[in-house]
Image (spheres, helix red, strand yellow):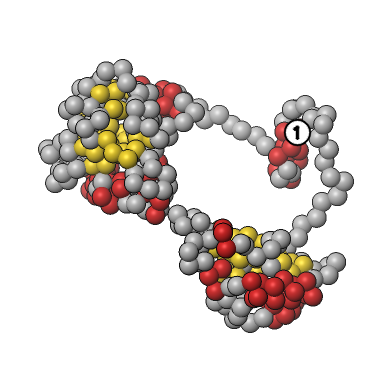
């Protein structure tokens, strides 16, 4: 098991119910270390902590000299990394620096640990998943946790250590359900499964009807294609070519998402005009663009009211500021 913890919504409470079995607890306190805390120099300007307090005898941290962990929007109020309380069966991997304390005075808190449990292994890493799993390499974080902070090396070691028993045995898994414990059966009626509308599902499960909510009299399914690039940007073919092919396939609509950096106001006007000519009551051709902002987020936008103003863009005019 690799157990992490998001900072918000009191997620640690439910995770602690699980951890109680394993002799561990996540403490909902901020880690404060003025000597080693630092702030991101641009973008969201988040705060991070730096530590060289790694267990040189542990196989996960062996050979790694430093680690950077996320804190939050403030150096003394961040919950992106939470400290741990552990029994003696756990082995610490990473601690904050000796001078660090939590908001309630826990000195040199442990922020990553592992233990053996039966035939299995557990690593506990109560850190915001955005920085290590969801978007660790996203440009906005400047490689602070994954590259400069050795997060990639640590995680690589974590996965290898966790998988070691299974790899050695040649058997993946092996969990056996206790005989005394019965799995709860959940029965869904065919009528429930037929409805994909969440409101209808609620009604079928016994929820009261919302008096201020009315469902549409008729619903239709429309089949179409999103993401086409023509020769106006980095693709091939024309609007007319794609509309013809889409109609032959039985589609009801097609959405063009031209590469923004290859487009301009003149090309956009032409795309809008050609889409309008190709549209009718039975088929829609919709103009759009694919673009990214200066922090690396990617978007598609379609049926725009007008071409973006220069004031919305970076100096080169290739990205949204």
Residue at image location 38% in from the left, 48% down from the top: 42
Give the percent coordinates (x, y) of residue 280.
83, 70
Residue at image location 27% in from the left, 41% down from the top: 68
Q: Please give left or right for residue 15 compared with residue 258 in the image.
A: left
Viewer-nearest residue: 1 or 313: 313
Is residue 292 visible to us here? no
Neighbours of disc 1 within 10 Å: few (<14), some (14-19), many (20+) = some
Give the percent coordinates (x, y) of residue 258.
60, 70
Question: Circle 1 sits on which residue?
Answer: 204
Q: Is residue 67 above or below residue 20?
A: below
Give the percent coordinates (x, y) of residue 158.
27, 44
Residue at image location 25% in from the left, 20% down from the top: 106
**Mark 1: secondary structure:** helix
Give the percent coordinates (x, y) of residue 321.
51, 56
Is residue 317 visible to us here? yes
Viewer-nearest residue: 321 or 26: 321
Q: Please give left or right for residue 300 compared with residue 32 in the image.
A: right
């Amino acid at each position: 098991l690799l157990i992490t913890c998001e900072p918000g919504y009191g997620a640690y409470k439910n995770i602690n119910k699980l951890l109680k079995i394993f002799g561990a607890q996540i403490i909902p306190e901020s880690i404060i270390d003025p000597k080693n805390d630092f702030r991101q120099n641009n973008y969201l300007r988040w705060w991070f902590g730096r530590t060289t307090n790694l267990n040189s005898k542990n196989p996960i941290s062996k050979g790694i000299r430093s680690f950077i962990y996320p804190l939050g929007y403030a150096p003394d109020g961040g919950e992106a990394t939470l400290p741990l309380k552990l029994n003696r069966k756990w082995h610490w991997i990473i601690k904050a620096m000796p001078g660090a304390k939590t908001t309630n005075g826990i000195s040199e808190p442990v922020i990553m640990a592992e233990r053996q449990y039966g035939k299995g292994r557990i690593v506990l890493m109560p850190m915001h998943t955005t920085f290590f799993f969801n978007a660790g390499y996203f440009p906005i974080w400047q490689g602070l946790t994954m590259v400069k902070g050795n997060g990639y090396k640590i995680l690589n070691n974590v996965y290898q250590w966790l998988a070691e028993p299974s790899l050695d045995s040649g058997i993946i898994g092996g969990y056996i359900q206790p005989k005394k414990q019965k799995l709860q059966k959940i029965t869904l009626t065919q009528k429930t499964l037929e409805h994909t509308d969440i409101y209808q599902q609620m009604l079928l499960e016994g929820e009261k009807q919302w008096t201020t909510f009315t469902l549409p009299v008729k619903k239709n399914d429309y089949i179409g294609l999103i993401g086409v690039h023509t020769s106006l940007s980095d693709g091939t073919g024309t609007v007319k070519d794609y509309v013809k092919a889409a109609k032959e396939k039985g589609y009801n609509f097609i959405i063009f998402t031209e590469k923004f950096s290859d487009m301009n106001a003149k090309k956009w006007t032409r795309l809008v005009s050609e889409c309008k000519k190709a549209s009718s009551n039975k088929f829609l051709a919709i103009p759009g663009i694919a673009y990214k902002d200066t922090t690396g987020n990617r978007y598609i936008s379609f049926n725009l009211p007008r071409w973006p103003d220069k004031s919305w863009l970076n100096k080169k005019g290739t990205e949204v500021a």
